[in-house]
Image (spheres, rainbow, N blue to C red):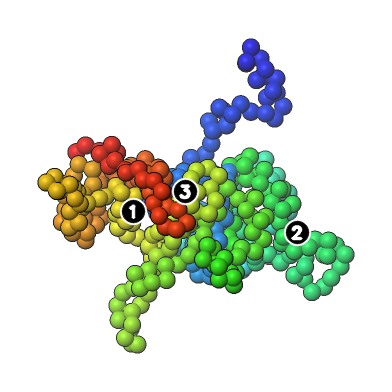
């Protein structure tokens, strides 16, 4: 009887929910293990919109590039379209990161008609004809020249309005296309600094056209540069007596996640010539934060031995630096730590109230997620 009604309910454009994921394109993993963990999906999910926002030179465009590059590695036929609204795309940098320029189309325009109308018009026709367009990127939303940004004013331009007026209807046109054809979509957005000091404590940035982006996005990621001495990748002396910066650490805060747990944070090292580096150290830091890598308990006193470190059923190692080195040198150990991290639940961490007090705490049982040697 149920099959009869389900058949009638899905005879036009309906679909049984159990069948929705059967033909999904595979997840696109990122080069960063902690970012894969923070997304909870293991990487970028085709058919979903990712908004990357943050201050200048933090790594937003680079992360969009990395998403397209990983897709190109995964799918040798995939074509990506990069809408360069800031006229800043660097083919040399894209190629240096491992990208295939032969399968990337760059459309340099900040005219919204040539971006959004192109997607709902000519690009949609190409998709219907079978074009393997698997990813798009708009860099950046703020770089688009909306009608109110133009000095020459006409009735049509006034009606077009600013980004806040233009984007909601524009997004409604392209979101169904992205979903239906399972296109990985990356929207890059610049931000403004929050001037209200109290609000800045919670969120230091104001996102232009934030409401429109928020409603359209499945993921919203805040991308910032780690502004500390440890956040700089550097090597060699310079004439001035300093060092040459070769990269920086990037912190990613998941502000919105429709597919999993929000509010997770990832951090990784990005080398300007080599891409994401220091994978072993990154996995060590993630495992330490989640309680997968811990101090062993002294069986006599029941207290932690803070000089020793251990993971699962492996023998304890003296010193944090030695433990970090052991993780960095062992792919097997890295895989086991990441497997343990994937089973982590937010309820395994202490719950902190507004006054910084622990409300409740459920200890992570490392032995339940470790892998036998």
Report, in whole angstroms, how far the alpha carbon at label 2 lies from the one at label 3.
Answer: 30 Å
Q: Which mark is residue 165?
A: 2
Task: Name which residue lies at 47% across and 48% down.
Answer: 39
Quadrant for the C terminus, please.
top left
First reached walking from the N terminus: tag 2 or tag 3: 3
* Residue closer to the observer: 321 or 59: 321
Note whether 113 is above or below 45 in the view shown: below
Numbered disc 3: secondary structure: helix
Number of residues whose C-alpha sits closer than 10 Å to that of mark 2, classed few (under 14), some (14–19) or many (20 or more):
some
Quadrant for the N terminus, please.
top right
Q: Which mark is residue 39?
A: 3
First reached walking from the N terminus: tag 1 or tag 3: 3
Number of residues whose C-alpha sits closer than 10 Å to that of mark 3, classed few (under 14), some (14–19) or many (20 or more):
many
Quadrant of the rendered image containing residue 356: bottom left
* Residue closer to the observer: 371 or 310: 310
Number of residues whose C-alpha sits closer than 10 Å to that of mark 1, classed few (under 14), some (14–19) or many (20 or more):
few
| Image mark count | 3
First reached walking from the N terminus: tag 2 or tag 1: 2
Numbered disc 1: secondary structure: helix
Task: Please give left or right for residue 197 compared with residue 283 in the image.
Answer: right
Task: Name which residue lies at 88% across and 64% down.
Answer: 155
């Amino acid at each position: 009887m149920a099959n009869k009604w389900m058949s009638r309910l899905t005879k036009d454009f309906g679909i049984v929910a159990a069948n929705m994921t059967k033909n999904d394109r595979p997840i696109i993993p990122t080069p960063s293990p902690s970012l894969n963990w923070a997304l909870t999906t293991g990487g970028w999910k085709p058919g979903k919109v990712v908004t990357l926002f943050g201050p200048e030179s933090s790594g937003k465009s680079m992360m969009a590039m990395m998403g397209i590059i990983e897709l190109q590695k995964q799918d040798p036929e995939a074509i990506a379209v990069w809408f360069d609204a800031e006229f800043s795309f660097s083919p040399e940098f894209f190629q240096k990161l491992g990208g295939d320029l032969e399968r990337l189309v760059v459309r340099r325009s900040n005219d919204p008609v040539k971006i959004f109308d192109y997607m709902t018009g000519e690009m949609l026709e190409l998709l219907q004809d079978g074009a393997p367009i698997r990813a798009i990127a708009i860099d950046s939303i703020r770089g688009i020249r909306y009608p109110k940004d133009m000095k020459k004013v006409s009735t049509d331009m006034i009606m077009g309005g600013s980004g806040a007026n233009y984007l909601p209807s524009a997004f409604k046109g392209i979101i169904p296309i992205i979903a239906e054809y399972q296109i990985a979509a990356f929207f890059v957005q610049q931000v403004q600094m929050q001037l209200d000091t109290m609000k800045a404590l919670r969120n230091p940035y104001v996102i232009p056209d934030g409401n429109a982006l928020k409603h359209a996005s499945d993921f919203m990621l805040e991308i910032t540069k780690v502004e500390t001495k440890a956040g700089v990748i550097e090597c060699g002396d310079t004439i001035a007596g300093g060092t040459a910066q070769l990269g920086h650490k990037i912190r990613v805060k998941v502000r919105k996640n429709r597919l999993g747990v929000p509010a997770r944070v990832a951090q990784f090292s990005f080398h300007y010539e080599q891409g994401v580096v220091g994978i072993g150290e990154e996995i060590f830091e993630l495992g330490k934060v989640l309680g997968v890598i811990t101090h062993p308990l002294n069986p006599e006193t029941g207290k932690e031995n803070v000089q020793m470190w251990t993971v699962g059923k492996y023998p304890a190692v003296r010193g944090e630096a030695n433990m970090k080195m052991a993780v960095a040198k062992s792919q097997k150990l890295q895989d086991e730590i990441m497997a343990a991290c994937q089973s982590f639940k937010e309820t395994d961490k202490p719950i902190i109230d507004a006054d910084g007090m622990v409300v409740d705490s459920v200890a992570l049982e490392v032995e339940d997620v470790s892998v036998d040697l």
